């Protein structure tokens, strides 16, 4: 079962997860971080960037240095012109590579260009395997229950491939574009099988709009109709959510109780 941590705010989530990532990269400077785009992981990136620029003390380590670490993005839109500010390559550059100080040569985003699109998934899988897989994968969850862009119906064994976005996801993501029609119809996304290979999954969700998907993913039946429920198969999952996103969880009181009585050595 997933560990569910209910926090007061996005900032508190950012601090909790940033602590853990900073510790990981301190122990292994060449760690592989799985990065998501969208709003949910932003507090983590901002907290890591703040610590990097201010050299803030935390736990056993000092400052945070991603100069030798690797990053793999979950997904990318298909067919946006190169350099489009909403391409996930551009978003990852802006939110992760530059502020966290990754070497751009060590940051991987699936190639959503039309040329060679048939084999882009396979190439991404090979790159992931060659790097030894993801140590910690950050995830958001869509209102459709998607993780990555694995929309309802995605196989639990799926690998990186081209998918069609749902009308709902296109509407949800229209806020990043000038007009809803500009949101691409297709994407390349790591599959559920790819995501499940990461050694630790950290799913972040905030706000009432995510409550239904969070409850279904954490406590509902495991089903391809709710792709986020695939996290129930993983041995090490941490779900970090605010009160609003937790509002439909049946066992919220138990999760709070467990956190209040968590052994100090355990970490996330
Ligand atoms: C992004 C991704 C998506 C988002 C999800 C939630 O790379 O794979 O699964 O995490 O759509 O998006 P936000 O965080 O913007 O609500």
Image: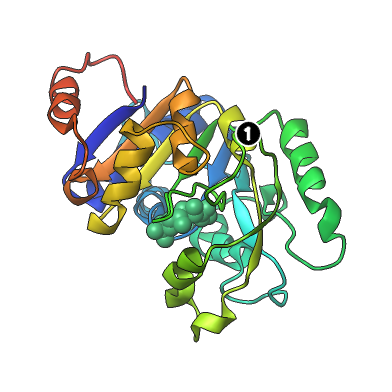
86 vs 105, left or right, is left
> Ligand 1 within 8 A of label 1's CB?
no
Is residue 229 among what the camera can see? yes
Kindly identify the residue that appears in the image at 80 percent across and 38 percent down. 126
User: Secondary structure beneath disc 1?
Assistant: helix
The residue at 58%/75% (across/down) is 85
Q: Residue furthest bottom?
A: 178
Q: Nearer the viewer, residue 3 or 109?
A: 3
Q: Nearer the viewer, residue 223 or 38?
A: 223
Quadrant of the rendered structure where residue 187 is?
bottom right
Camera-side residue: 61 or 203?
A: 203
Vertical order, 192 against 91 (above or below): above
> Can you see residue 30?
no
Q: Position of residue 184 (x, y in %)?
A: 62, 72
The quarter of the picture where residue 16 lies is: top left
The correct choice, above or below, for 230 with respect to 160 in the image is: above
Vertical placement of residue 28 versus 124, above or below: above
In x, y percent, where is residue 238?
37, 31
Placement of the N terminus among the 4 image quadrants: top left
């Amino acid at each position: 079962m997933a560990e569910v941590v209910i926090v007061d705010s996005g900032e508190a989530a950012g601090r909790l997860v940033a602590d853990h990532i900073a510790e990981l990269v301190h122990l292994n400077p060449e760690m592989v971080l799985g990065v998501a785009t969208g709003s949910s992981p932003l507090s983590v990136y901002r907290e890591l960037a703040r610590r990097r620029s201010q050299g803030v003390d935390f736990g056993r380590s000092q400052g945070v240095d991603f100069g030798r670490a690797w990053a793999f993005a979950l997904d990318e839109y298909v067919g946006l012109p190169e350099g489009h500010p909403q391409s996930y390559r551009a978003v990852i550059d802006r939110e992760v590579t530059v502020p966290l100080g990754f070497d751009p040569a060590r940051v991987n985003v699936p190639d959503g260009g039309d040329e060679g699109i048939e084999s882009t998934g396979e190439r991404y899988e090979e790159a992931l395997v060659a790097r030894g897989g993801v140590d910690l994968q950050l995830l958001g969850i869509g209102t459709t229950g998607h993780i990555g862009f694995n929309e309802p119906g995605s196989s639990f064994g799926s690998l990186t491939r081209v998918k069609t976005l749902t009308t709902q996801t296109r509407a949800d993501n229209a806020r990043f574009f000038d007009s809803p029609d500009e949101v691409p119809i297709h994407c390349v996304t790591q599959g559920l099988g790819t995501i499940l290979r990461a050694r630790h999954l950290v799913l972040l969700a905030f706000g009432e709009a995510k409550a239904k998907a969070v409850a279904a993913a954490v406590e509902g039946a495991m089903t391809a109709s709710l792709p986020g429920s695939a996290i129930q198969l993983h041995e090490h999952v941490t779900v970090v959510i605010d009160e609003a996103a937790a509002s439909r969880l049946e066992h919220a009181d138990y999760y709070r109780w467990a956190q209040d009585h968590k052994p100090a050595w355990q970490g996330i």
